[in-house]
Amino acid sequence: VAFALVGSVIAAQAQTQVIYDNSGDPVLGTYAPTDNSLEFGDQIILDGDSRIVTEFRLEYFSSDAAGDATVRFRSNSGPSLEPDDILFETDPIPLEANFNTLEITGIGVPISGDTFTFTIEFDVAGTQNVGLILRNPPSIGSSFDDVWVQADTGDWATRNIPAATANLAAQIGAVPEPSTVALSIVGALALCGIARRRK
């Protein structure tokens, strides 16, 4: 019984929880900096209590099935809370034509606190039209009404999007930290012990 109970606790704790979701309607448009080689992204505020990010989905568009993109998670630990340390970085991901979703699974990145910035950097030919989808409002979590853009100098600045809410279409899934799972297991074993003593 104890092993069955512990197993059920582990299974429950291991289930992915959506901690940010801005993938619902309405679609407000698209966005990309004038220079599509710049790294840019969205600072978000997470919901729930799971903070080991395991899944990330990001909607984009591309005029051609060419070039690639690199996705990063950055902490907002700069002097003015701008994006700074890289928490996670993908290898270059090949782009497909038209509207698509980058889907990244098996990540396992711990997030400290309730906010971070996800970014994307395109590597495409000068004539290729690429960018991200705008949606609003997020159904889980929230987002600041601007985007971070890194200039060639390495400095970050926020930009608003005229006539649109600057929320990039993305979804993030996470699982609890190991300490949370461990506490649940201890609690389950304690309940088993109490039940056995009562018997």
Image (cartoon, rainbow, N blue to C red):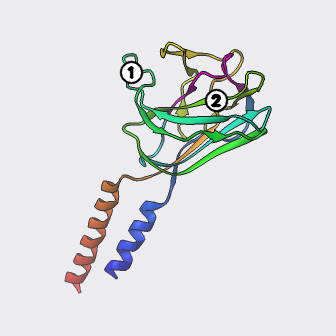
Residue beneath the point at 70% across and 39% down: 95
Does the image show residue 139?
Answer: no
Task: Identify the residue position indicated by label 1 in the image.
Answer: 78
Give residue 122's mark: 2
Residue 196 placement: quadrant: bottom left
Q: Quadrant of the N terminus?
A: bottom left
Of 55 and 123, nearer the camera is: 123
Residue 89 against residue 7 in the figure, above or below: above
SS type, badge 1 = loop
Residue at point 26%, 79% (across, down): 195
Indicate left or right for 71 with 131 as reference. Answer: left
Is the Cβ of the residue at disc 1 closer than 8 Å to that at disc 2?
no
Tag 2: residue type? Phe
Residue sitting at the far bottom: 199
Q: Does residue 40 appear to the left or right of 193 in the view shown?
A: right
Q: Which residues are magenta?
A: 30-44
Where does the image place residue 128, in percent across and percent down from the top left? 76, 26
Query: Does the segment drawn in magenta span residue 39?
Result: yes
**Circle 1 or circle 2, nearest the eye:** 2
Residue 51 at what x, y percent from top left? 42, 46
Question: Would you say 191 lies left or right of 197 here?
Answer: right
Q: Position of residue 165 (x, y in %)?
A: 65, 23
* Foreground residue among 38 and 23: 38
Q: Residue at x 76, y 26 (%)?
A: 129
Q: Amino acid at mark 1?
A: Gly
Residue at 70% across, 34% down: 67
On-image quarter of the C terminus: bottom left
